[in-house]
Amino acid sequence: MSMNTQGRPTGIGIAPAGASTPAGAFASTSGSSLLPNEPLLFEIGDTEHSGVDLPDASIGDEFLGGFKRTTPLDLAGLTEPEALRHYVRLSRLNYSIDSGMYPLGSCTMKHNPRLNEKTARLPGFADIHPLQPVSTVPGALELMNELAHWLMTLTNTSAVALTPKAGAHGEMCGMMTIRAAQAARGQGRRNVVLVPDSAHGTNPATAAFLGYSVRSVPANAQGTVDVAAVKAALGPDVAAIMLTNPNTCGLFEPQIIEIAAAVHEAGAFFYCDGANFNAIMGVVRPGDLGIDAMHINLHKTFSTPHGGGGPGAGPVVLSEALAPFAPVPFVRKGDGPLALVEHSSDTHLGRITAFNGQMGMYVRALTYMLSHGGDGLAQAAKDAVLNANYVKARLTPTFSAPFGEGPCMHEALFDDHFLEGTGVSTLDFAKALIDEGFHPMTMYFPLVVHGAMLIEPTESEPRQTLDHFCDVMLDLAADARAGNAGRFTGAPTRAARRRLDETRAARSPKLKWERAESLPRAAE
Amino acid sequence: MTTKYTEDHEYIRVDGAHGIVGITNYAQDQLGDIVFVELPSIGQKLKKGDEAAVVESVKAASEIYSPASGTVTEVNMALAAEPGLINTSPDADGWIFKLKLDRAAELDALMDDAAYAKHTA
Amino acid sequence: MRYLPHSDAERADMLAVIGATSAEALFASVPRSAMLSKSVDLPAHSPEFLVEAHMRALANKNHAAADGPFFVGAGAYRHHVPATVDHLIQRSEWLTAYTPYQPEVAQGTLQMLFEFQTQVAHLTGMEVANASMYDGSTATAEAVLMARRLTRKDKMVLSGGLHPHYRDVVRTYLDNSPNLICQPASPEGQGDILSHIDDDTAAIVIQTPDFFGHLRDLERAAEAIHARGGLLIVVVTEIVSLGLLEAPGALGADIVVCEGQSIGNALNFGGPYVGLMATKKEFIRQMPGRLCGETVDAEGTRGFVLTLSTREQHIRREKATSNICTNSGLCALAFSIHMGLLGEAGLTRLARLNHARAVALAKALRAVPGVELLNKTFFNEMTIRLNSLAAPVVEVLARNGILAGVPVSRLIPDDPAAANLMVLAATELTTDADIAALVSGLTGALK
């Protein structure tokens, strides 16, 4: 048993104050004041305590039709000081971009400016209702229109569907517009979508979700897609290709213009996954490459915070051919004031979400764009590419880059060749990074590379941090090859937890706190 | 009783017109700890190569293809509670389903012990 | 540029280490014709105070809910969010953390999600809940798809009390399937969904309180659909109602989806919000979205991980239950903190207070000449029929600084029966003065 600095029990043997479970319901090792073992909300709170003062209104049953609740809510409550401490202590168990670099390939974990948070909280944006009269929210329509202008200018496209809630939702929206456009052309029978093997998992999932069958397109030895391979896979049954550019190997698809031409010639559409737009914003306009639709992850490229897994936003830019099929609602610019089109007439898709999309994210993204300006966004893309190439240069040849000699874009891809015979896996290696103060890199993705390690430093990292990261990586590699496997297979040892038993979690899922099951599993 | 193997690491242990299907020790080792098995339904008719079951580890899900055509006569319900049987005993307690074969001759195209050993070498 | 750490000298040094002649050389694989020769036609970078001024000017053009009497609901509700909530969610470790795929360095987020799942399960009276969806409407569409997978049936019946936008989202997700039966809107709580149930019905979808504010009988619906081998999907757009009304799980629901915005989250013109989804344990393998589960670490210490991820797109790819990836983590956190501050005692009081304010509103509205209250039952929202078109009345009141309810014609434009209807909500923030202002405004407008 140990006590933390606040005198709250953190170890075994003592029940937390107000707990409804017996002693020993949590944690078999004690925490420290910096890495606390925090009990569950349901173990420290109870159904009587509350951190909100509200009058107890007297009500009758007149309008409740006999539907009054009889099942206990069983919701734990905390007073305000207890709540603050609970969530502050929990927060300290998290790594975050403000505390260190995330070398997470394909995730674009960049700096989140606080001005974005400030503007998003202006009452004129945060405290407006999606169904209050449109005449009372002209500033909101202007903001959406301005964001749309920036996105269309950066991509050289004709329209943008703002409402998708995240990247995968954007993919769904983009592919739905393609399906609608084909139905309008009388090409509704096209039921195949081409997806390269290196694609992000959402691509085939989206295609299948919409009833398409997925045809894989192999990558070539350079990690990119050949126009010949695409041509071989194209046919009258193909509705679209879904291609990520820059691709998940961190490479710009060199034949993308030819691929777009071949796809169009076959009567199909070109969907581009814009997850990696950060590498080229302000430098290359996807519309110039021939893409028809591309979602943009505002939470990656335009720095709306990741929030521990969302909310995101995934607006989709659309070519002229697809623009008439965008979902409602959208802002229409005419001669008079901006209008909010809320009902689908003629060709437009219906709603893909109840309201106007992620307004809070629009505000943050536009704030970020205005701060950077067109010039700053291009510089950010160039710095992101510079940083990735710097990491690649410093880590090669110790780390083996499967797609060799040329420069990469915004992320550097390595395989696990350098770990051969060491008894250390990519996973072990990544977990060892935690003990050195870094978040692990993206592992085992893309699938086309054995033991892949994908590193995306983003433009936010100063050279000093990159050097420190590379020094750590090289030191770890040397240690692995010197036979010190223990440093890796046991890692991490300096985090809030040692490696967690995922098999146990999946074999007998325990997905919520249960009052009855009060004994620690560790003591079984 | 003979055992035959597919290139996808399913085995079928054949006794007359009946076969017992599972995945090989090599396959379970590659997959890691199995956490869930989706079983076929009894009476389901399968053609050789049809997806018959799914085994899931923490990080991967793999389809199990039927090594032969036939009708499912029995499924291993023990796997619902204890999917780890596939790891601890892939060729005995960890079997997945039993099949009444349509054509025993279909099995000739599959690998025998020696060929499979070579395949996984 | 304040967000970019490199000086030009550092950039040059780094290029030298790389062995590249220029920054442009790193873009060698980009077809020359695709490289922009000059910068995009957009304004240049701008100092913080100018950007803030620009955004403030846009924001100031909007009438915020707190600027005057406010009765807009219909799927998004204005409630008080304690200051603690917004302070906490802006902590770096919550705001700027990635999805908790590396559990050793994400126990904060994971434990919070485990607590969130528990809260949602208890509120809805269900066995399990996931770690959030985008919002209530997309969660409803995902529930419909989930029910089709579970039952292997196709037909889906949506109640006429379902929020029209939710109905539209389901329609879009199902690509206007002919097997999707949408009952006509039922502003008086009418409509018999049970007569549509047959052996081919995968599920019926019932919202309660419904779009028009009526409380719906779930128990009878559950019996009817279960008798034919289908599922009951219950939609709740005002989560505060569950502090006063029976849990859908206790009434036979198989899947419960909710909009969680009311707790912890601002109106935000429609997003980001947080979708809740709960179901029975036997159905979890067909439930979309992330799930957090309890386990132990190598030393036996309790910890949490994302689990059952083989259902998800990054592993199952085209066989995934859904393509959802990013969800509403930070909104779920705000929900969980606010709910943790309320607790059972606080949520119960909040729900009672909401109902009390709505009763006061209903009684006041009933006394206005030219207004007919359509509800016999409600929680905090109700529908009135005016003796004239509702939309112009709402506009007139808005010009006088009163944001009255939502004219139903805005959501159901082509139905003459809906043209005079207005849906209004009251919450704990609705004062007697607000109600008096509304009554006076309505009385004037309806003369």
Image (cartoon, coloured by chain):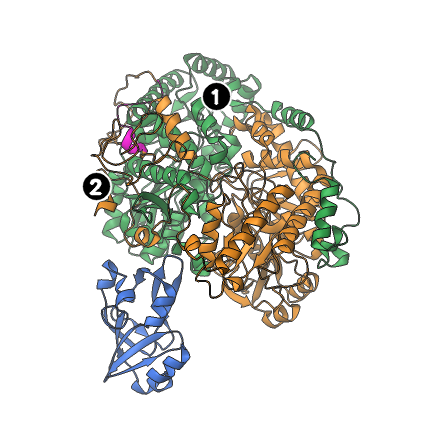
On screen, residue C88 versus residue C229, left or right, reads: right
The one of A490 and B65 positioned closer to us in this rendering: A490
Residue A308 in the image, given as x and y percentages of width and height: 47, 40
Q: Chain A: give its colour.
A: orange
Q: Which residues are magenta?
A: A41-53
Q: Is residue A367 above or below residue C128?
A: above
Q: Is residue A54 above or below residue C37?
A: above
On screen, residue A70 versus residue C106, left or right, reads: left
Q: For marks 2 and 1, give the CA distance.
A: 50 Å
**Residue in view at x 30 percent, y 25 percent:** C348
Q: Chain of mark 2?
A: A
Which residue corresponds to mark 2? A519
Residue B83 in the image, given as x and y percentages of width and height: 27, 61
Which residue corresponds to mark 1? C70
**Residue in view at x 27 percent, y 32 percent:** A43
Q: Verify whether residue A207 appears in magenta.
A: no
Identify the chain drawn in blue.
Answer: B
Please tell me whether the stretch drawn in magenta is mainly helix, strand or loop. loop
- Camera sees residue A371: yes
The one of B53 and B32 positioned closer to us in this rendering: B32
Residue A164 in the image, given as x and y percentages of width and height: 54, 44
Q: Quadrant of residue A512?
A: top left
Identify the chain drawn in green.
Answer: C
